[in-house]
Image (tube, helix red, strand yellow):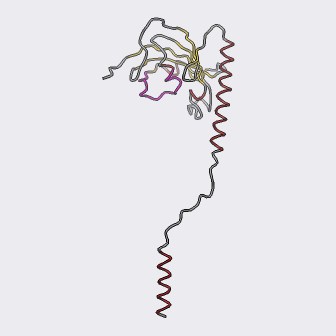
Amino acid sequence: MKTLLLTFGMCLALCACKSPEARKPISKSSGSFISESVERNKAMFNAQKLRIEEMNAAQTDVEYIASKSGFWYYYNSKIEKDTIMPSFGDVVNFNYNVSDFSGNEIYSTSELGTQNYIMDKEELFTGLREGLKLMKPTETVTFLFPSQKAYGYYGDENKIGTNVPLICKVTVNTITQTQND
């Protein structure tokens, strides 16, 4: 009986000393979802870009400028003289409205009110943030933003839905420069 208990104890000790084995994953990720998402987004961007180009061709009275950031714009009123443009930390006072590509107003200037935005220190959708950097005081610019430069996939969770390209007419009232020490 002692031998049986001793043998059982030794077997138990040997089995207990076994190192843990790594478990193999149950499923493998093929990356196809990401690839499909990229292709969907490229197709959506190209469709929105084509729509913008059609709008540009239809409006012969204005000259659209393609920005390096991926949106288009034209000047309603342009200041030709050399003056200040906003940089990091400057306070930009502006008014704007938001419409969809069909011309339906989503937010009016009176609804949005006058905005004070501290450049690159506060939240603002990407296209408008980049567009303000191109403007001088008292200029008015109309921007055409594809959805990824506007509110993208999530919308604004209010009036702007998923993947909606936008038209924004923006007037910069003043730019207050800050002291960069």
Q: Residue at x 65, y 15 (%)?
A: 56
* Residue 141, quarter of picture: top right
Q: Say left or right for 14 vs 88.
A: right
The magenta-colored residue range is: 116-130
Q: Is residue 59 magenta?
A: no
**Seen from this angle, which residue lies furthest bottom?**
1
Q: Position of residue 161 (x, y in %)?
A: 61, 31
Q: Quadrant of the C terminus?
A: top left
Q: Residue at x 48, y 6 (%)?
A: 80
Q: Position of residue 22 (x, y in %)?
A: 54, 62
Q: Say left or right for 15 vs 180.
A: right
**Seen from this angle, which residue lies furthest left?**
181
Q: Is residue 117 magenta?
A: yes
* Residue 85, quarter of picture: top left
Q: Say left or right for 126 vs 166.
A: left
Q: Say left or right for 35 vs 68.
A: right
Q: Position of residue 171 (x, y in %)?
A: 50, 14
**Seen from this angle, which residue lies furthest top?**
81
Q: Residue at x 46, y 88 (%)?
A: 6
Foreground: 26 or 14? 14
Foreground: 117 or 21? 21
**How many numbered circles are shown?**
0
Foreground: 157 or 162? 162
